[in-house]
Image: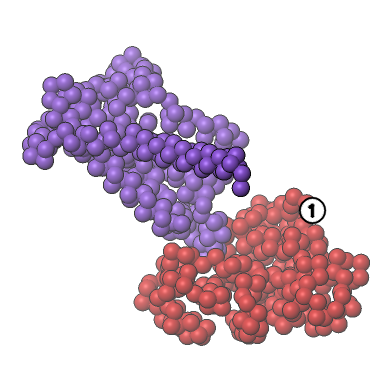
Chain colours: A red, B purple
Amino acid sequence: MLNATLIKKLRDFELDIDLSVNDGEVMVLLGENGSGKSTVLNLLSGLLVPDEGNIILNNIELFSSEKGIFVPPEERNIGYVFQNYALFPHMTVFDNISFGLRMRRIPKNQFNEEVDRFLEDLGIAHVKCERVTNLSGGQRQRVALARALIIRPHLLLLDEPLTALDQSAREKIRLELRTQLVNSNQPSILVTHSLKDARIIGDKVMMLEKGKVIWSGKASDLKSLSTIPDDSAVNFVSEEYISFSGIAID
Amino acid sequence: MSFTQKGTRNSKKLKTTIAIIIFALIIIITILFFTLPLFSLLLRISPEDFIAAILDPDVNNAIMLSLITAAMATTIIVLLGTPIAYLNARYEYRGRNFVETLLDLPIVLPPSVAGLALLVLFGRRGLIGGFLNDIGITIIFTTFAVVLAQVFVAGPLYIRQAKTAFAMVDRVYENAARTLGAGPFVTFVKVTIPLAWTGLVSGVILGFARGIGEFGATIMVAGNLPGKTQTMPLAIYGMMQSDLTASIALSIVLIAMSCIILIIIRILSGRSS
């Protein structure tokens, strides 16, 4: 379970957001580019430091401006799937996925089996020894997800995990991803600018604009787009429209 | 077609031909200017004389001393230069431009000035040399002074190259390593260095090459003592009058080394791009 209050002065606006995500629940942060949604992930993971607020994950305080607590990213046990995946280009698929386990000093004979199981589950066992630079977009996405999930994270963060894929791969992986996130049973936060991602993968949705929440509710409520406030930057045009104000419907 | 028009066309053609010839001449002269002196060295010595000269103890000592001092200098440069190269590549801080300019200074500084500066600092009455002299340590005119001169002159080349190599590593990989449980130092060793590797290696090679070729600063701060401070460039200068063959042989060794270094750097830069 994650509870967080994050306040951070950014260049153009102040980010101010309250979050609460349960285990096995997927929270989607929806918004156009530059709305502050990726910053939220960086603040939660410890890559950025909030100006004020607190982060409590599984009853452990990871950050508190009041008490002067800051747990560094390497000690937070938070899985992070980066936009474009950030797979280490100098390593094989196996070395990428096992990186987190090696950092936890788990002996090789123990993590070998674990890595193989993840590779099997994600259907990428045949590329185990490939360099990640030789993989397709869909394979990269799966390696990135495996690398983040294998450390059994207390929280999983995903930054636009489907943007780097072509449309047919996206359709397929979108459904898979929902299943994986629910099954892995930690709170997950997914950042996207696609309404369809939000509807299919999310349980709860928060729509961000200039660092503030302008709409929040269940993902199922997104089906009737009329609940999105008219006065926001998000002005609904039509279901088929590819992108409006930076939010995509594909 | 009138006569004058034809004449104009012919003279235009002539002008173009002359322009091409002049252009080609400039190219040929340029290439010859830079290669002919080196070839003339090769032509002045027979293979037998070359081998005999190389086997001469003084020449041999100079080669060994050059390799050892340049290797030591390069090691020191990497140990001292890597942290500041990383700092300058990754962090904005007040005065960074100033620090970078200071560190670049030895690249453009005349080596004799560098040598004099080191002499004044490490000499027996110098700021540091005076203190060391009191506790019985002499630096100038020792092999260590040779290393010191090489570090001073070649270090900035490595720092520059390493900074560029680090700056080209996308931070997102370091961030990914951190979230996976790697602390800053482990991230640096396991992710940043391997990703900057080719750039770092060419920096090392550039530094080594500059160290091997160091002359001006070395002769001022370390002198020209055979077997002790006489590196290859100093030996070439020292033997030029007494034993030209030995000088030429050493020069050819240095030319060969330079060629190898350039080829390695070309291969490395080709691979990284």
Position in image of residue B31 (x %, y %): 35, 38
Q: Is residue B188 above or below residue A179?
A: above
Q: Residues within 10 Å of mark 1 (few under 14, many from 20)?
A: some
Residue at position x 11%, y 41% in the image = B47
Q: Secondary structure at mark 1?
A: loop
Residue type at mark 1 is Phe
Q: Toward which corner of the image does residue A236 lie, by quadrant?
A: bottom right
Foreground residue among B59 and A199 = B59
Residue at position x 57%, y 68% in the image = A85
Position in image of residue B221 (x %, y %): 30, 22
Q: Is residue A189 visible?
A: no
Position in image of residue B184 (x %, y %): 50, 54
Q: Is residue B151 above or below residue B204?
A: above
Residue at position x 18%, y 24% in the image = B240
Position in image of residue B157 (x %, y %): 41, 38
Of all residues shown, which one is farthest toward the top? B125
Foreground residue among A230 and A100 = A230
Q: Is residue A229 above or below residue B166?
A: below
Foreground residue among B152 and B211 = B211
Q: Chain of mark 1?
A: A
In screen coordinates, is B183 left or right of A24? left
The residue singled out by tag 1 in the image is A13
